[in-house]
Amino acid sequence: MNDCITCKRYEESLKKNKALACYEADYYTPGMVSYCRPQMMWLIEWLPVIEDGDWPPDPKETGYTEPAVQTTRSSRAHFENAAQVAAEVTARLARTGKDGETLVHLIQSGLSDYQRLPPSALNALNYISGWRRKKDSYSRWGYDQRRKSENIRIRKT
């Protein structure tokens, strides 16, 4: 997936010899979330759980805890990170209207390959993805994207 190759966090992880590949991960901690496409699809899949204030369980956890190990305490409530991420994802989806609703329905119905999304849902996914929210409205952003692709086609001929 091209997203991770151009991601600054991915480049930094390669320098540390710890390749971070979002599209290969099956779990993200709140600190790992950078709202790229693979993460947004995962967050939408788990959105009902996250909106309830819980973070999805790590599938690699065994459930074993060492009794003598001290845990660190946080100044945040246990549900705060989940609530903040859920609010951000929900706010981004709200700006996409029906296309966002279609995206949520497809992902929560089990579609996990973004390349198989219909064009309207793929546009919504591209709009909501990225470290920051888009400044333009969804319709304006879509118009600009179509103009860019038309200009590229004209230059190639």
Image (tube, grey):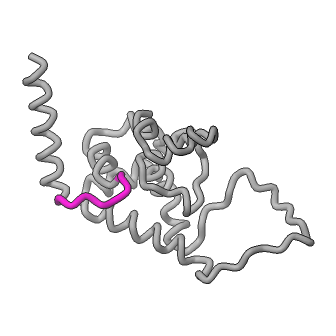
- Name the residue at 52% across, 45% down: 12
Query: Residue 125 location, x and y as percent?
Result: 34, 49
> Can you name the residue that lies furthest to the front here?
15
In magenta segment, residue 19: no
Front-most of 145 and 103?
145
Relative to 111, does residue 73 appear above or below in the rendering?
below
- Name the residue at 46% across, 72% down: 84
- Name the residue at 76% across, 55% down: 61
Query: Residue 127 location, x and y as percent?
Result: 28, 51
Which quadrant would residue 6 be assigned to in this image?
top left
In-image side of 94 versus 6 (left or right): left
Which quadrant would residue 151 be assigned to in this image?
top left
Query: Residue 87 location, x and y as percent?
Result: 41, 71
> Can you name the residue that lies furthest to the right here?
68
Prevailing secondary structure class for the magenta stretch in the rendered image: loop
Relative to 145, does residue 131 appear above or below in the rendering?
below
In-image side of 103 versus 77 (left or right): left
In-image side of 142 versus 98 (left or right): left
Q: How many marks?
A: 0
Query: Quadrant location of the N terminus?
Result: top left
- Name the residue at 30% across, 39% down: 118
Query: Residue 17 location, x and y as percent?
Result: 63, 38
Residue segment shown in magenta: 129-136
